[in-house]
Image (cartoon, rainbow, N blue to C red):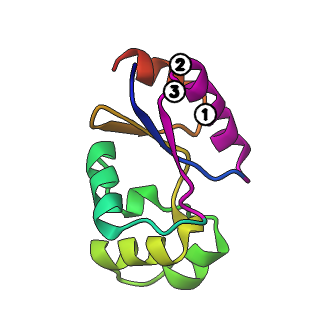
């Protein structure tokens, strides 16, 4: 059975839908409630590597925290990661991880194809 991790925000309908699909496909789903449980910097860096994305790529640019803490500032990757950890609403969601690969499943249906390839 595939081990799946999902960075999940229960307040997000897309995240809830992606989690439901993952649970249908596997009984080994680890939910990471990144909004309420602090994620380690090393863990977020690993997720970015698995996504093949930069911190800037993973930022939710319509969030008020983005406009207040990121927009218009010349930040390096580490500074952006630190802000994502401090203000987790900045992290795009849901993130689904399996076998060292990851996707941002903004369209929850993407989970089906992603997990089928794993």
Which residue is denoted by mark 1 in the rendering? 18
Say which label, 3 or 1, has the lower sequence index: 1
Residue neighbourhood size for the residue with mark 3, other residues' Cα within 10 Å, grouped as few (<14), some (14–19), many (≥20): many
Q: Residue furthest top?
A: 116
Query: Is the Cβ of the residue at disc 3 closer than 8 Å to that at disc 2?
Result: yes
User: Residue 109 occupies which quadrant of the picture?
Assistant: top right
User: Residue 94 occupies which quadrant of the picture?
Assistant: top right
Say which label, 3 or 2, has the lower sequence index: 2
Residue neighbourhood size for the residue with mark 1, other residues' Cα within 10 Å, grouped as few (<14), some (14–19), many (≥20): many
Helix, strand or loop under label 1: helix
Mark 2 and mark 1: Cα distance apart in space:
11 Å
Q: Is residue 27 visible?
A: yes
Which residue is denoted by mark 3 in the rendering? 111
Please report the residue visible at 48 percent of the width from the left and 69 percent of the height from the top: 38
Magenta range is 11-35
Helix, strand or loop under label 2: helix
Say which label, 2 or 1, has the lower sequence index: 1
Residue 83 position, x and y percent, is 45, 77
């Amino acid at each position: 059975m595939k081990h799946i991790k999902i960075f999940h925000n229960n307040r997000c309908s897309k995240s809830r839908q992606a989690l439901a699909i993952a649970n249908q496909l596997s009984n080994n789903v680890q939910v990471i409630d990144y909004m309420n449980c602090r994620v380690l910097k090393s863990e977020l860096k690993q997720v970015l590597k698995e996504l093949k994305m930069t911190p800037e790529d993973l930022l939710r640019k319509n969030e008020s925290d983005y406009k207040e803490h990121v927009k218009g500032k010349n930040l390096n990757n580490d500074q952006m990661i630190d802000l994502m950890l401090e203000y987790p609403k900045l992290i795009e969601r849901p993130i689904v991880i399996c076998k060292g690969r990851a996707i941002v499943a903004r369209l929850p249906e993407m989970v089906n194809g992603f997990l089928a390839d794993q």
